[in-house]
Image: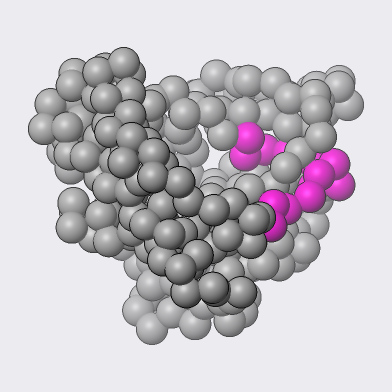
């Protein structure tokens, strides 16, 4: 018997992606979508799926929005997915094969995430395999307090399962760069609140290290132009984060 699980997704103007996302969750009885008052066709698409329960909630931050969505799910075991992600066939089969013993022995199951960017799958530069714990017991952990790269921190033990989370990055390079800079600002706020203060090597050497690590050590050059571009953007993001942190320190931001 297939395990009883819920899935949850948060949205904001995701009409280009959400249909395929929800279609890949057709094997899940209970799917919760929490939307930040989209003004495109997101709501209509979501309501067209019989297994989806649709709610609206004003967005404050990623952690609170996802925590709210998870609180609405019916079952203890939940599958977390982003609107631009899909459950692959292999991943779905791995979930459906889980037994009661598996659910008793483990608190979290991890899957590789594979990203499609531009016109190809990105398989190097640290982008793959990018394991994510996305199927977990919601009673066995807590949400992180970070403003960016939020995640549900699950108590061990965990287990890796076969199958990929298919991530379709819809941003062009400009939009992706701007998003990474915004994430860098949020990351700087988190560091500042933790008492971290910038040193020269963080915004001089760390960005250079990031590029060389991704492009050469993690073989990003095998992904051609996009491998190079993503390596550069990663380096810029690191530089921006510590530059923002430097600015906060100089201004005495509290």
Question: On screen, 153 above or below 44?
Answer: above
Is residue 120 something one can see in this rendering? no
- Residue 52 in percent (x, y) is at 60, 62
Q: Residue at x 67, y 67 (%)?
A: 64
Quarter of the figure with the N terminus: top right
Horizontal relation, residue 159 to residue 25: left or right: right
**Quadrant in the rendering for residue 174:** bottom left
Magenta residues: mostly which secondary structure? strand
Question: On screen, 47 above or below 75?
Answer: below
Horizontal relation, residue 253 to residue 17: left or right: right
> What coloring was used for the rendering?
one colour
Q: Residue at x 41, y 66 (%)?
A: 247
- Nearer the observer, 70 or 94: 70
**Quadrant in the rendering for residue 9:** bottom right
Count of marks overlaid on the render? 0
Q: Residue at x 86, y 47 (%)?
A: 139
Q: Residue at x 33, y 29 (%)?
A: 209
Question: On screen, 153 above or below 251?
Answer: above
Quarter of the figure with the C terminus: bottom right
Is residue 165 something one can see in this rendering? yes
Horizontal relation, residue 111 to residue 179: left or right: right
- Nearer the observer, 127 or 17: 127
- Residue 169 in percent (x, y) is at 31, 48
- Nearer the observer, 210 or 54: 210
Task: Tell me where the magenta segment starts and ends, as one range.
Answer: 133-145
**Quadrant in the rendering for residue 134:** top right
Check if residue 144 falls in the magenta segment: yes
- Residue 85 in percent (x, y) is at 43, 46
């Amino acid at each position: 018997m297939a395990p009883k699980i819920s899935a949850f997704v948060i949205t904001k103007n995701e009409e280009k992606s959400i249909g395929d996302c929800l279609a890949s969750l057709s094997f899940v009885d209970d799917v919760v979508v929490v939307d930040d008052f989209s003004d495109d066709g997101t709501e209509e698409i979501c309501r067209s799926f019989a297994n989806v329960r649709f709610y609206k909630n004003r967005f404050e931050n990623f952690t609170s929005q996802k925590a709210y969505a998870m609180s609405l799910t019916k079952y203890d075991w939940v599958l977390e997915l982003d609107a631009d992600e899909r459950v692959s066939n292999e991943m779905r089969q791995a979930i459906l094969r889980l037994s009661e013993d598996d659910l008793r022995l483990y608190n979290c199951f991890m899957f590789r995430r594979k990203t499609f960017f531009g016109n190809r799958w990105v398989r190097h530069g640290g982008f793959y395999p990018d394991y994510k714990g996305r199927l977990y017991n919601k009673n066995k952990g807590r949400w992180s307090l970070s403003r960016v790269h939020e995640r549900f921190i699950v108590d061990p033990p965990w287990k890796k399962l076969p199958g990929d989370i298919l991530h379709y990055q819809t941003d062009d390079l400009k939009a992706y760069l701007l998003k990474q800079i915004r994430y860098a600002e949020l990351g700087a706020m988190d560091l500042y609140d933790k008492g971290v203060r910038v040193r020269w090597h963080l915004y001089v050497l760390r960005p250079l290290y990031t590029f060389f690590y991704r492009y050469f050590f993690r073989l990003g050059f095998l992904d051609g132009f996009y491998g190079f571009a993503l390596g550069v953007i990663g380096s810029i993001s690191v530089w921006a984060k510590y530059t923002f942190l430097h600015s906060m320190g100089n201004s005495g931001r509290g």
